[in-house]
Image (tube, rainbow, N blue to C red):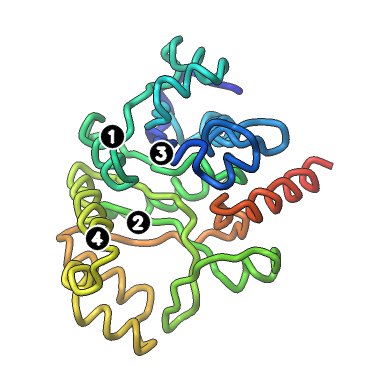
Amino acid sequence: MNFMETTSKAFTGVVLAADRGISDPVAREAGVPCKSFVPVGGRPMLLRVLDSLSDAREINSLVVCGPSQALVAQEPELHNLIKSGKIRWIQNQATPSSSAYHVLTLLPHNVPVLVTTSDHALLRAEIVDYFCREARTTACDVVVGLTSHERVMRVYPETIRTATRLRDGRFCSCNLFAFLTPRSRRAAEFWQKVESNRKKPWHMITAIGWTVMLRYLLGRLSLVEGLNRISRRMDLEVRAVVLPFPEAAIDVDRVSDWRLVEDIVVDRDL
């Protein structure tokens, strides 16, 4: 892992690394104390993500939100990186959105932030740099990473990916989020609101907007229109970067995902 100290890079990279511990089915299958420590190619997923962020030209410093201090102590390399100050550790909150919001409030508001997750086992420096460069050119507050569902299924037909069906195509999330301006921090507050209402459909519709939801359900909502409407809802400029890397959409939610990324890594390293 090449944790170079430099002032020429732009972003602070944040990895959300809390999970359900041994109760997580992937962690249980792998026999490790939490999903972040599930090995891929013989290396814990969290360390693989940190490797990629460290090697990316666009990343200046690294923050890990979770896992607990007790779990960190069980992974010597991670523990040493945190103890040495090469990585900053921050206690996670109850949910991913509240963890992201908490971290963003603790970081300088004039520094752009890239947020990703510890189960993004196929993340590479090339993907990180592409996303960060393209995000910066938008001159927006918040940028999300997406990729074409068709492209993902064409390259990895065995995977199961949730897709957002829009008028101009189906898109998969890539668990890459850029917070580019001081104003952008309020997007995490909006995320918290939506996440807290995910089991209350009427409340969630109120947060997103009736018009957006109706046009989406009717298949009339385009990506640009959806982002414009969400931008107005949050009083922010929100845009998307559509990545040409199908593997960017594959995180490890299930045991089958773990098996797939293991196979991909083996094939890539041959």
Q: In front of the other: label 2 or label 1? A: 1
Q: What's the residue type where badge 3 is placed?
A: Leu
| SS category of the residue bearing label 2 | loop
| SS category of the residue bearing label 1 | helix
Say whether disc 3 or disc 1 marks the residue closer to the N-terminus: 3
Q: Could you tell me which residue is drawn at 45 percent across and 52 percent down?
A: 175
Q: What's the residue type where badge 4 is placed?
A: Val
Vertical comparison of 101 with 50: above or below: below
Residue at which label 2 appears: 138
Say whether disc 2 or disc 1 marks the residue closer to the N-terminus: 1
Vertical comparison of 28 with 146: above or below: above
At which x and y percent is residue 57? 51, 34
Residue at which label 3 appears: 16
Q: What's the residue type where badge 2 is placed?
A: Thr
Give the residue furthest to the right.
Answer: 270
CA separation in Å, label 2 and label 1 = 23 Å
Q: Residues within 10 Å of mark 2 (few under 14, many from 20)?
A: some
In the rendered image, which quarter is residue 124 located in?
A: top right
| SS category of the residue bearing label 4 | helix
Callout 4 touching callout 1 (CB < 8 Å): no
Q: Could you tell me which residue is drawn at 45 percent across and 47 percent down?
A: 133
Residue at which label 1 appears: 103
CA separation in Å, label 3 and label 1 = 9 Å
Say whether disc 4 or disc 1 marks the residue closer to the N-terminus: 1
Q: What's the residue type where badge 1 is placed?
A: Val
Quarter of the image with the C terminus in it: top right
Q: In front of the other: label 4 or label 1? A: 4
